[in-house]
Amino acid sequence: MIDLYYWTTPNGHKITIFLEETGLDYHLRPVHIGKGEQFAADFLKIAPNNRIPAIVDQAPVDGGEPLALFESGAILEYLADKSGRFLPREPRPRFQVLQWLYWQMGGLGPMAGQNHHFVRYAPEPIPYAIERYVKETARLYGVLDRQLQGRDYVAGDYSIADMAIYPWAKLWEGQRQRLEDFPNMAAWLDRIAERPAVQRAYAMAEQINADPDALLTAEARRLLFGQGS
Ligand SMILES: N[C@@H](CCC(=O)N[C@@H](CS)C(=O)NCC(=O)O)C(=O)O
């Protein structure tokens, strides 16, 4: 059994998509980040960076004690190895997937995250910051779009790289992007959205948090952007 510490955000969706795709046994443990639950002492023991997602694998492959992990990229890699799915073992195809996973973790995630912050959450508009992150998001989608030219998935077969990128790329509209600029990405978004496991992951998120503006309250902003409990 995997305990998944989760909220209904892009980094959370990555892991529910993976778990739904593989059918690994898991238990959802919602951490409402708009209410400051990520600062609870028990959660910090598992996720010292006070961010979701995190997991505790109650039955790790080495047969040892329960294993706690944070950082969505590490979690995806761990679960892919555990299940033998969505990450090849042979070095060449494996590192094709991993380079795109790390592209998401170190590039698209942080940049689109700042895009969301300055476009949607910042208390006042800062044109320089908005332009910087909207342009950088566009540059990154250009890179992704070129990679997807003539390919159905980002790196060979459907993999943890697609699962990591999709929840961020799906939000292109709020990131002030034009989908017609990225036709290969548009077709890929449709391809992934059709997958039953992806649909189940998002349906579950709706059940846990139906309010897309839950992170826009004054209290949520104070907690998230003041970074305190
Ligand atoms: N690099 C981390 C980023 C995790 C992250 O930023 N999580 C956000 C939600 S998407 C969060 O928990 N925020 C809570 C906070 O900022 O206090 C990962 O991929 O796991």
Image (cartoon, rainbow, N blue to C red):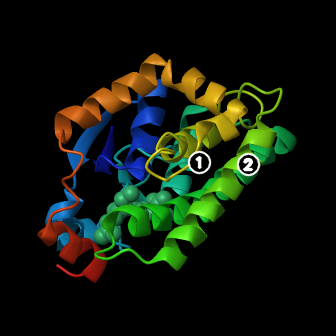
Which three-letter amino acid code belongs to the residue tagged 1? Glu
Image region (quadrant) for ligand 1 = bottom left
Query: Type of residue at label 2?
Result: Gly
Confirm if mark 2 falls within 8 A of ligand 1.
no
In the rendered structure, the answer to whether residue 52 lies left or right of residue 210 reads right
Residue 224: image location, x then y, percent: 27, 72
Vertical placement of 25 versus 94: above or below? above
**Near-viewer residue (200 or 2):** 200
CA distance for labels 2 and 1 = 25 Å
Q: Secondary structure at mark 1?
A: helix
Q: Residue at x 56, y 48 (%)?
A: 177
* Residue 77 disc label: 1
Relative to 176, is 86 on the left or the right? Answer: right
Residue 54, horizontal then vertical, whole percent:
37, 56
Give the position of the N terminus as an image quadrant.
top left
Mark 1 closeness class: few <14, some 14–19, many ≥20 residues within 10 Å:
some
Q: Judge by depth and name the residue closer to the eye, 221 or 124.
A: 124
Q: Earlier in the sequence, mark 2 or mark 1?
A: 1
Q: How far from the left and from the top, in percent, is residue 195?
A: 50, 19
Residue with the mark numbered 2: 142
Q: Give me the residue at 21% from left, 51% from top.
A: 213
The correct choice, above or below, for 97 with respect to 129 in the image is above
Q: Residue 5: x and y, percent?
A: 29, 52
